[in-house]
Amino acid sequence: MLALAVGTGLAGCTSLGPGQARPMRAAAAAPARPAEVLSVDPLSAELTSYYGQIENERRANHLMRTDSGATEGRISAAQLAQTYIDVALRDERTSGTSPAVLRRWAVPVRYDLQFGATLPRATRQRDHDAVRTLAARLATASGHAISVAPLGQTDGNFHVLVLSESERRGSADRLRALVPGIDDSAVRLITEMPRETFCMVLAFSRDGSATYSEAVAVIRAEHPDLTRLACYHEELTQGLGLAADSGRARPSIFNDDQEFALLTDQDLLLLKIHYDPRLTPGMTESRARPIIFSIASTLAAGAS
């Protein structure tokens, strides 16, 4: 049985003897690289304009900040603890109103990036490099093993699909191959994703467990650069177990106000709490709450 958690948001020489001169020869021309041929998705043009306009408007309104949030002042232990409860022990599918048990990975996480045919080679490489940097930060903060598969390899357990509109709509068979046992409703969450949903992550647990075994993040290829990077930051972190958003989370990417585009210092502290060995998968808020506040007190004191 496959259970589902949802998060949404917003890569030889020759020796010469003494006095012997090497004969001059013309440098061999490097083999020409085949011209890159990109697919054009007829459904993408309007969406590219739409998401580009939204990013421009948000940045003009001083949203989508890329700083760490350090200028916002000291985070209290109580604020840190409550923010953690809001984003880790609430169900995103009910807009954070229903309680949820603690879920996280026990096995090492390995992201693999799978790009559709509309993104140029340079963009794929740049995104892959950005995700490698992000994964290193997530691994350091959580203390959990997190890595990224080489570009072009698809042997991870956390699949990151960067697809155009037509590619995403037609991805059902691909999703069933990546996550054996995925049900039709989970597939439709992706293939029928409304344009108001910028990106999404689905994390899966098997046999009633509270530990994740697989995850799939879907990011729109039509996004401009900062929005696409923001999606990587949010979905790849939410898929580690910080699955919900909260209006009280600040400074944080786990807030639908879009003030921050990239992980903040507080977000990394939330991840550190989540993978603290004193907490275990399956814990409810009532069991975890005193431990959470104890951990938060230590972290807040160290951050001051």
Image: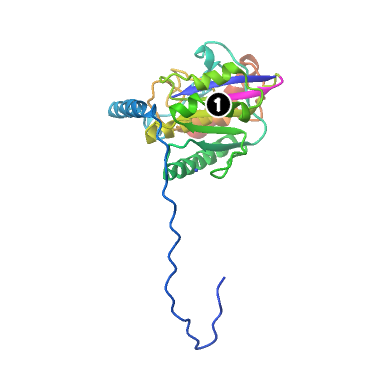
Can residue 130 be seen by looking at this rendering? yes
Q: Is residue 260 above or below residue 98?
A: below
Residue 45 percent across, percent down from the top left: 35, 29
Q: Is residue 205 above or below residue 25?
A: above
Which stretch did the figure color magenta? 203-207
Neighbour tally class for label 1: few under 14, some 14-19, many 20 plus, Cα within 10 Å: many
Residue 269 percent across, percent down from the top left: 52, 31
Magenta stretch: includes residue 208: no
Helix, strand or loop under label 1: helix
Q: Say left or right for 189 vs 228.
A: right
Q: Quadrant of the N terminus?
A: top right
Q: Say left or right for 264 vs 278.
A: left
Give the amino acid at mark 1.
Ala
Magenta stretch: includes residue 205: yes
Q: Say left or right for 69 vs 289.
A: left
Q: Residue at x 43, y 34 (%)?
A: 229
Can residue 69 be seen by looking at this rendering? no
Residue 173 percent across, percent down from the top left: 58, 26
- In front: 61, or 40? 40
Q: Residue furthest left?
A: 60
Name the image quarter holding residue 216: top right
Q: Is residue 293 above or below residue 269?
A: above
- In front: 219, or 58? 219
Q: Main secondary structure of the magenta part?
A: strand
Which residue is identified by label 1?
296
Name the image quarter holding residue 203: top right
Residue 188 percent across, percent down from the top left: 54, 18
Q: Is residue 222 above or below residue 21?
A: above
Q: Residue furthest bottom?
A: 19
